[in-house]
Amino acid sequence: MDAAQHTLLVTLTGRDRPGVTSRLFSALASHELSVLDIEQVVIRGRLVLGALLGCPPDPDLTAIHRAVRALAADLGLEAEITMGSGEPARRRGQLHVTVLGSPLTPAAVAAIAGRIAASGANIDRIDRLAHQPVTCIDFDVSGADPESLRVALAREATQQGVDVAVQRGGLHRRAMRLVVMDVDSTLIAAEVIDLLAAHAGCAGQMAKLTEATMRGELDFATSLRERVSMLAGLEESVLDEVRGELRLAPGARTLIRTLRRLGYRCGIVSGGFSQITDPLAAELGIDYAAANTLEVSGGKLTGKLAGPIIDRAGKADALRRFAAQAGVAVSQAVAVGDGANDLDMIAAAGLGVAFNARQVVRDAADASVSVPYLDTVLYLLGVSRDDVEDAEEGDLAARRQASGTTEPPLGVQ
């Protein structure tokens, strides 16, 4: 398109109703115009519809004004027409800035938008991805350096009590195909080794070692061997009891179901134990799993591990192995974790997410989530809450039809 092409911007605002878009373009159809861009937003029944139109150097503005204003008057809308020149702006930004809050206050939005402007960047588009149980807003931003903007927004997010993620835009986010999660305190709301310690009568000592290890104060492999030794003599049947005590993080099932609908592969990797994680993976339909294995002899735990240790480096190795098995590049993988032993896989993945994590992990990750809902990871992939709920309702309707029942809707877990 010629950079000097003349343009008209037609904007309609007011109460939304069916047929507005159709009637606007029908009114414009008899004029020598071409459609360059269209954007429409409806918030609580209020419509903003904008159409950018290419036109000849001397358009019949009087006739166009008359047609648009007659339409607006008939529909009870306000109309504005402005003339300009040049190419339409790019619709998509080069970066996605995703903001999550519970609640998300006007002050927080003002502060984040102010930081974006101060960086010399422009907000090209804003979309809402969720409104409950958290509010999530996605900004398309152009003209910013990703690293400097990430640092600036991370500081602002801490002050405002919200979460902010900065990612490359366009195809980068759409290319993600594999999500790999830590298990303890990420997929499940507990540390399995602490639950085992409660049965072994050493819960207090175990919890202190676990917390220091997750903060990165102790070498993971050495700490794990020491903690496992404290479980020597525990009946193997206790593993079944602990499995029954597990509670998934809120939104975990929704996250995994939605990822599978979208064609993603899912994996879990844990510094915990395969006797727990393998049944969990089978129950949830997770494709890949890796964890340590407790040695058992004569129906009791020996206090030792069988096989190689899955530590910080082992988690990153597992991520790469899962990606190879899925046939995707590691850059197309998302890694989610909370502890220091997750740092290597978070660094290796295309998108590293700190989930209710220690500060050392939040500082290293591409994105940080501090709300307890694991399905907020979907918003970082550009999947909206409305899309998730529509899919859940569709699946429920299909199950009802297949079974011939009319059971009430299930709660989303």
Image (spheres, rainbow, N blue to C red):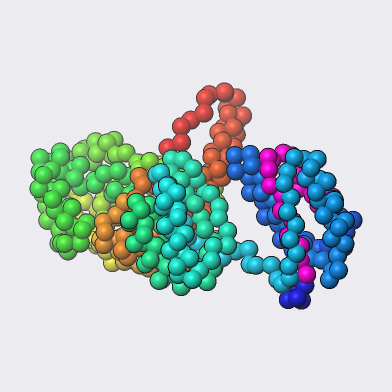
Decide whether residue 24 is among the magenta residues: yes
Q: Give the residues drawn in magenta, as a range.
A: 6-26
Q: Is 408 or 400 nearer to us in this picture?
A: 408
Q: Is residue 163 left or right of residue 381?
A: left
Residue under the image location 42 percent in, 68 percent down: 149
Residue under the image location 45 percent in, 70 percent down: 119
Q: Position of residue 251 (x, y in %)?
A: 41, 42
Q: Is residue 216 left or right of residue 388?
A: left
The C terminus is located in which quarter? top left
Q: Is residue 56 left or right of residue 322?
A: right
Q: Is residue 408 above or below residue 214?
A: above
Q: Position of residue 19 (x, y in %)?
A: 77, 42
Residue under the image location 69 percent in, 40 percent down: 16
Q: Is 72 or 176 nearer to us in this picture?
A: 72
Q: Position of residue 187 (x, y in %)?
A: 35, 47
Residue 178 seen in this snapshot = no
Q: Is residue 37 left or right of residue 337?
A: right
Q: Position of residue 132 (x, y in %)?
A: 46, 40
Q: Is 205 or 244 nearer to us in this picture?
A: 205
Q: Is residue 296 above or below residue 168?
A: above
Residue under the image location 79 percent in, 42 percent down: 73
Q: Is 170 or 148 nearer to us in this picture?
A: 148
Decide whether residue 384 is among the magenta residues: no
Residue 3 seen in this snapshot = yes
